[in-house]
Amino acid sequence: MDTLLDARGLTKRFGDILANDKVDLVINKGEIHALLGENGAGKSTLVKMFYGSLEPDGGEILWRGKQVAIGNPAAARELGIGMVFQHFSLFEALTVVENIALALPDPGKMAELAKRIESVSVDYGLPLNPADIVADLPVGIRQRIEIVRCLLQEPQLIIMDEPTSVLTPQEADLLFLTLQRLASEGCAVLYISHRLEEVKRICHHATILRHGKVVSECNPAKETPATLASMMVGADVASVSAGAQKPRIGEIRLGLSNLSAKAATPFATALNSISLELHAGEVVAIAGVAGNGQGELFDAISGEMPVAQEMIRIDGRPCGSRSITWRRRQKAAFVPEERLGHGAVPGLKLSQNIVLTRHATGDRLTGGGFVSTARANALEKHIKQEFDVRMSHDDPEARSLSGGNLQKFVVGRELDRRPAVLVVNQPTWGVDAGAAALIRQALIDLARSGSAVLVISQDLDEIFEIADRIAVISRGYLSAADPAEEMNRERVGLLMAGGAEAQGEVA
């Protein structure tokens, strides 16, 4: 096989932290190559050096056998390296063709570019209408824009970061067909994903990073998700168990009754007559593609978006217009999707972030106008130990933690309260297999202790692993929450693609 990219001894430091330690990596023409590792293993740092967003402190990059210095993303694209990011960089108020034109060095006339977009998108099974406004498009179509924009630059290597995290199973299958076709045409793909089943399914080779070093390489097709996970973490990953017995269902702890809310902005999603009863002892999961009302639903339940009083009840008490603090005093806890900035204040220490969410919940953190720093520090140490939150020193600022470790802290901070009701949005977003197993088991254990747990997630593997009942949200409508054993991925995928909306309208 012809070698496209050959990284030799790549090293990158950030102060005292060695993010990449003499990394060697070879990517061949026509290869789908997986890059795996825990949170903080150095994957993002490595690909940013390939794409020109970071400069190596040591080592060299060879492109088609010649040493190159990739000074910026434009230089990477000039070589033939493209990247599709996990978080989209699209202007919602602009059309598809306008968004793509902004990324091309010489887009030419808009009419001609529109024809090129139509031709390339249809040719690769990713059809787009160049005239569509991005704000009107579902997330799966938005990802098509990112991919087609990359393809129009005629890359020889495409870096993809968690590409299926916002797709339905049916959309993911179409993406896999596109990647396999690109590989058959000689284009290489560097594929980053925490979803090990899909890595095993489509990748030809895998390189595993741990603590900034390459620790293993393998053919994923000959491995299992469990063996891949153990290579990533350096030990066997504990399996998640819901217990041999069915959950003992108790009283209704959270009730939603015809919950409706208008879209707060032109790009938000309205909620339409959502009804749900969440019982003590169970985990109910809400599946859905991003941007279908999950954030708005979370904000309404948590109290960040007031609604009519009777639309939401916690342990029978109407609270639609009550504050977040009032709901917390009723033993409700909330974990938002955005951990840094919403779940934690970046510039505050972890102990101070604990005080922000638990000052009114009976934890004796405040009294007489004073904050008990000793109590806050003790809680910080306890959460760090219980949830394996890894940090360079005691009680650091929230922004100094890796994404996965901050997620473990934010989830652990709320679980440590043993709340009667827990609502968590994307509990394992972007975390590695070991951390995901820890969080998922903790959610199940909380429910089995008598709490009611509502999980909003885009990860179907996660949903089927932990949920007792599953509902689907689509364009602000919620389907019925049916027993997990009566659901399958195909049915959930169809509901995610619009079936929940139809079901909600009928209801």
Image (cartoon, rainbow, N blue to C red):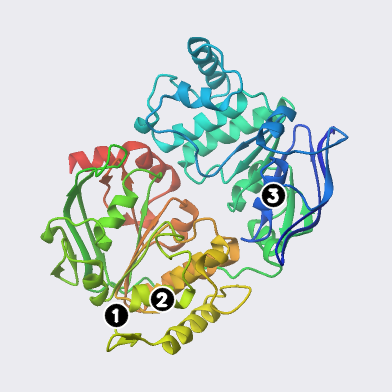
| Left/right of residue 97 with respect to residue 104 in the rendered view | left
Q: Amino acid at mark 3?
A: Leu
SS category of the residue bearing label 2: helix
Q: Nearer the viewer, mark 3 or mark 1?
A: 1
Residue nearest the viewer, comparing 158 with 342: 342
Residue at 74% across / 27% down in the picture? 186
Q: Are marks 2 and 1 in contact (CB under 8 Å)?
A: no
Of the numbered discs 3 and 1, the one sitting upstream in the chain is 3
Residue that carries the numbered disc 1 in the rendered image:
361
Crowd rating for badge 1 (residues with CA inside 10 Å; few <14, some 14–19, many 20+) = many
Quickly name the residue at label 3.
35
Dot 2 or dot 3: first in sequence order is 3
Circle 1 — which element?
Answer: loop
Distance of mark 3 from mark 1, alpha carbons?
Answer: 43 Å
Task: Identify the element where label 3 is drawn.
Answer: strand
Q: Which residue is mark 2?
A: 354
Q: Residue at x 32, y 77 (%)?
A: 450
Residue 120 position by quadrant: top right
- Give the side of residue 194 with respect to residue 25, left or right: left
Q: Residue at x 15, y 70 (%)?
A: 316
Disc 2/disc 1 C-alpha distance (Å)? 11 Å
Q: Is residue 481 visible?
A: no
Q: Amino acid at mark 2?
A: Ile
x, y percent for residue 57: 79, 53
Q: Nearer the viewer, residue 8 or 472?
A: 8
